[in-house]
C-alpha cells in the first residue's frame, strides 16, 4: 500500500495575501480521496520528530534559537513565515513524516510526504520557506541506523537545494543532485555534487532530455541503495516564481521517469513535494496529485 505522510498542521495559517500557497496541503489529500486514488488507510499522521535526529543535521544553537523563538528578525524575514510555536511544531511533524516514509519505502518500495522538500534549510540557518531540512534529517537517520549506505538525493525543484548541498558538502555517503533554474533563487548557489543549471524558459524536450541523459548514469556511477526525490512543481510554465516553460504533461513525464529508474534499479524512494507557486491553486494541486497518481499506478 502507498503510505502518505499528512497532518492537518501542514496547512499553517498565514497573513492574508501571503504568497506561499499553504492551501495546497489541504487540497491535495482531499482531491486524492475524492477521486478514489487513495483511501483513508493510505494516510498516516506523523508525530513531532525527536530532537536528537534534528541535531544530527542542524547545529544546536540554530535549533534552540528556532525552538525557543529566538531567531533574529533578519533570519525570520529570510525564512518568509512569521515565527511561532505552531510553525516550529509543524516543521518537526513534516520532518518526522519524511523519516517515517523511509521505513514505509523500505517495506513497499515507495512512500510520500504531502509536504517536505525543505531544501533551503542549512545546518545553521533557515531561508526560503524552509526551517528544518526534512530530507537531510531523514538521510542522516537512515545512515545512523544502518538502513542505507549510499543515498542519492534527486532534487528537481526549480530552485537549487542550497541547504542540502551545504549540509552534505563533506559527506561522501550522500550524493546531492540538483537540476534548477540558473537565473532563479537563490542568488548565491552552493555546490551540490552535481548541479545542472537550466536556462530561463527551458521547455519540455530540453528539460526531459537532460534528465533522461543524467539520472541513469548517476545511479550507475554512484550505486545508491536509497533515493530521495524532491518533486517540486514550480518547473511549470504557469509558475510565477519558476521561470521555466515545462508543461503539466512534461512534469508528469519527469515524475514517471524518476519512478521508472527507481523500479528498474530496485531502489526504495521517498518523495517530498517541494515547491509550486502557480497563480491558480488548481494548477499546483493537479500537478502534485499527478505524482501521487503515478506512484499508485506504477508501484501498486
Image (cartoon, rainbow, N blue to C red):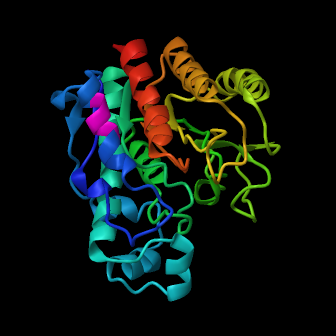
Quadrant for the N terminus in the image: top left
Question: Please, is residue 243 above or below residue 295 in the view?
Answer: below
Q: Position of residue 98 (x, y in %)?
A: 36, 45
Question: Please, is residue 111 above or below residue 165 in the view?
Answer: above
Residue depicted at x 55% and y 24%: 252
**Location of residue 222 (image quadrant):** top right
| Residue extending farthest right | 199
- Give, as a single range, the part of the protein colored magenta: 28-32
Q: Is residue 124 something one can see in this rendering?
A: no
Q: Which of 110 and 20 is in front in this view?
A: 20
Magenta stretch secondary structure, dominant: helix
Residue 66 left/right relative to 278:
left
Residue 194 left/right relative to 26:
right
**Location of residue 250 (image quadrant):** top right
Q: Nearer the viewer, residue 262 or 139?
A: 262
Question: Please, is residue 123 above or below residue 28 in the view?
Answer: below
Residue depicted at x 72% and y 59%: 190
Q: Where is residue 112 in the image (x, y as percent from the top left)?
A: 37, 35
Question: Please, is residue 177 above or below residue 109 in the view?
Answer: below
Magenta includes 170? no
Q: Which of 256 and 47 is in front in this view?
A: 256
Q: Position of residue 270 (x, y in %)?
A: 43, 34
Quadrant for the C terminus in the image: top left
Amino acid at each position: 500500500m502507498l503510505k502518505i505522510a499528512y497532518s492537518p498542521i501542514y496547512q499553517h495559517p498565514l497573513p492574508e495575501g501571503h504568497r506561499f500557497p499553504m492551501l495546497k496541503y489541504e487540497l491535495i489529500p482531499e482531491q486524492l480521496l475524492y477521486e478514489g486514488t487513495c483511501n483513508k488507510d493510505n494516510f498516516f499522521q506523523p508525530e513531532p520528530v525527536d530532537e536528537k535526529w534534528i541535531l544530527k543535521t542542524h547545529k544546536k544553537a540554530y535549533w534552540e534559537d528556532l525552538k525557543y523563538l529566538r531567531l533574529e528578525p533578519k533570519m525570520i524575514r529570510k525564512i518568509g513565515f512569521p515565527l511561532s510555536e505552531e510553525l516550529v511544531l509543524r516543521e518537526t511533524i513534516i520532518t518526522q513524516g519524511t523519516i517515517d516514509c523511509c521505513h514505509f519505502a523500505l517495506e513497499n518500495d515507495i512512500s510520500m510526504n504531502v509536504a517536505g522538500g525543505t531544501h533551503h534549510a542549512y545546518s545553521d540557518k533557515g531561508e526560503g520557506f524552509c526551517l528544518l531540512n526534512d530530507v537531510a534529517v531523514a538521510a542522516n537517520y537512515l545512515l545512523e541506523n544502518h538502513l542505507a549506505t549510499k543515498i542519492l538525493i534527486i532534487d528537481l525543484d526549480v530552485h537549487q537545494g542550497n541547504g542540502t548541498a551545504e549540509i552534505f558538502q563533506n559527506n561522501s555517503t550522500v550524493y546531492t543532485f540538483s537540476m534548477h533554474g540558473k537565473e532563479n533563487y537563490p542568488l548565491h548557489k552552493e555546490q551540490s555534487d552535481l548541479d545542472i543549471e537550466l536556462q530561463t524558459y527551458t521547455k519540455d524536450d530540453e528539460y526531459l532530455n537532460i534528465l533522461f541523459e543524467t539520472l541513469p548514469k548517476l545511479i550507475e556511477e554512484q550505486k545508491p541503495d536509497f533515493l530521495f526525490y524532491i518533486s517540486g512543481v514550480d518547473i511549470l510554465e504557469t509558475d510565477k516564481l519558476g521561470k521555466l516553460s515545462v508543461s503539466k504533461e512534461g512534469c508528469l513525464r519527469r515524475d514517471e521517469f524518476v519512478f521508472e529508474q527507481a523500479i528498474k534499479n530496485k531502489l526504495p524512494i521517498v518523495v517530498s513535494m517541494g515547491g509550486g507557486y502557480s497563480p491558480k491553486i488548481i494548477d499546483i494541486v493537479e500537478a502534485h496529485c499527478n505524482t501521487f497518481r503515478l506512484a499508485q499506478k506504477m508501484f501498486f
